[in-house]
Amino acid sequence: MRRKTVKIQFRTSLEEQRVLVAAACARGYSNPSAFARAAVRKELSNRDELTQAEQRVAASFDRLMAEVTRLSRQQQALFALVDTFAKTFLTCVSEPPVETRSQAAALASDRYGSGSIRDGLSKGDRYRRYGCSRYRPHTGFRSRIDR
């Protein structure tokens, strides 16, 4: 049984006709119609590939949005946990007695006075650890307790 064919015609300019004939001959097609049919087939198949690529990109964006939403919820839960911990800690831990406040402030000044803590050591401890005798700890620290 013979396949039914449909004749489709389209108009081109004289220059486009010359380019079409030259391209058909250069690429080994028997005539410009065969070249045009191959070009149409290729264009239609590329559209399917493009649609599949678009679907993959859309699925990737959907997965990313779900991941970002999940991370946002985890961040909110972590913030709430830290907030609750801080409130509980500050509620349960009493302030130092009046007699020892100046001593506590001096210890805090010695420990945190440099403003930079690395590896659990204050700046003064690091200098003393490596034998630097020229370091003098910061003495201008005033806590809210002393004010």
Image (cartoon, rainbow, N blue to C red):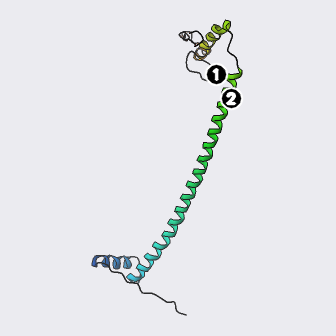
- Residue 134: give x, y in percent of width and height: 54, 9
Instruction: Residue 58: name its quadrant.
Output: bottom right
Question: Residue lying farthest front?
Answer: 91
Q: Which residue is mark 1?
A: 120
- 130 or 49, nearer to the observer: 49
Q: Residues within 10 Å of mark 2 (few under 14, many from 20)?
A: few
Amino acid carrying label 2: it is Phe
Give SS at disc 1.
loop
- Camera-near label (1 vs 2) is 2
Residue positioned 58% across, 55% down in the render:
62
Amino acid carrying label 1: it is Gly
Q: Residues within 10 Å of mark 1 (few under 14, many from 20)?
A: few
Residue positioned 65% across, 9% down in the render:
101
Whichever of callouts 1 and 2 sits on the residue coming sooner in the sequence is 2
- Residue 13: give x, y in percent of width and height: 29, 78
In the visual, does 87 lie left or right of 144?
right
- 97 or 122, nearer to the observer: 97
- Count of numbered labels shown in the rendering: 2
- Residue 145: give x, y in percent of width and height: 60, 11
Residue positioned 66% across, 26% down in the render:
87
Residue 19 sits above or below residue 129 on the image = below
The N terminus, quarter of image: bottom right
Residue 73 sits above or below residue 53 on the image = above
Q: Which residue is mark 2?
A: 85
Residue 76 sits above or below residue 127 on the image = below
In the visual, does 116 lie left or right of 32?
right
Residue 28 appears anywhere in the view:
no
Give SS at disc 2.
helix
Residue positioned 65% across, 35% down in the render:
80
- Residue 142: give x, y in percent of width and height: 55, 11
Instruction: Residue 28: name its quadrant.
Output: bottom left
In the visual, does 76 lie left or right of 49?
right
